[in-house]
């Protein structure tokens, strides 16, 4: 983005943030990968934008799927955000079963522990059975036996990791 786009985005989102404050709402920005958006792809970009907006109700959400594409590592963005990080999506690099991809889960959870993260850790994955969502997320093959299996296994995985890192 050029500086004009940064300013325009900040001015527009400031209006939204001010309106949200009137309802005691927090506005949370999520960096997503370059194939889905040009606006905010990294934690550093999200942080820059919320600093430009300069409203107290702005925070950031990270997602391991997008981080896998856009960040140089997983720990640096988590550590740099600290208390600005209020929501966390987890997914393998291929959006399939946890522990069967390339996401360095120990690095992710240890960084969350370092910042004393206490927000939600939410599974975000997709299955081909929900055709409209699968098409939008480019899910063309089955990554697990069923949606229930990925949810059950994913929850057990998150609980094990959270327990290991005292989250």
Image (cartoon, rainbow, N blue to C red):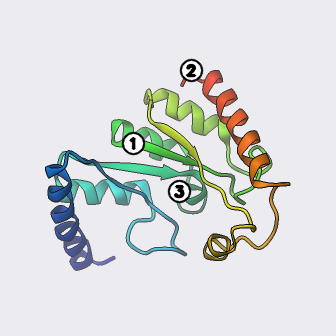
The mark that comes first in sequence, 1 or 2, is 1
Residue nearest the observer in this picture, 153 or 110: 153
What is the number of the mark on residue 14?
none
Look at 66% across and 39% down and name the residue there: 105
Graded by Cα atoms within 10 Å as few (under 14), some (14 to 19) or many (20 or more), the crowding at tag 1 reads many
Q: CA distance from mark 2 to mark 3?
A: 25 Å
Q: Position of residue 163 (x, y in %)?
A: 63, 22
Q: Quadrant of residue 116?
A: top left
- Sooner in the amino-acid sequence: mark 1 or mark 3: 3
Foreground residue among 86 and 74: 86
Percent coordinates x, y for residue 99 in the rendering: 77, 43
Element at badge 1? strand
Residue 71: image tag? 3
Which numbered disc flags the more N-terminal residue, 2 or 3?
A: 3
Is the residue marked by circle 2 packed among few (<14), some (14-19), or many (20+) residues within 10 Å?
few
Q: Of circles 1 and 3, which is in front?
A: 1
Instruction: Describe residue 34's horizontal placement relative to residue 107 as left or right.
Output: left
Q: Give the number of the disc on residue 166.
A: 2
């Amino acid at each position: 983005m050029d500086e004009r786009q940064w300013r325009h985005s900040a001015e527009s989102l400031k209006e939204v943030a001010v309106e949200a404050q009137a309802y005691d709402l927090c506005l949370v920005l999520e960096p997503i990968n370059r194939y889905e958006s040009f606006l905010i792809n990294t934690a550093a970009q999200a942080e820059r934008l919320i600093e430009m907006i300069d409203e107290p109700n702005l925070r950031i959400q990270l997602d391991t799927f997008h981080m896998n594409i856009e960040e140089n590592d997983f720990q640096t963005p988590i550590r740099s955000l600290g208390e600005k990080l209020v929501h966390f999506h987890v997914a393998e690099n291929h959006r399939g079963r946890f522990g069967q991809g390339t996401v360095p889960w120990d690095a992710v959870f240890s960084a969350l522990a370092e910042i004393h993260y206490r927000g939600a850790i939410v599974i975000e994955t997709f299955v081909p059975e929900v055709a409209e969502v699968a098409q939008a997320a480019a899910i063309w093959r089955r990554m697990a036996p069923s949606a229930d299996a990925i949810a059950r296994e994913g929850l057990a995985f998150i609980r094990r990791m959270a327990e290991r890192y005292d989250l």
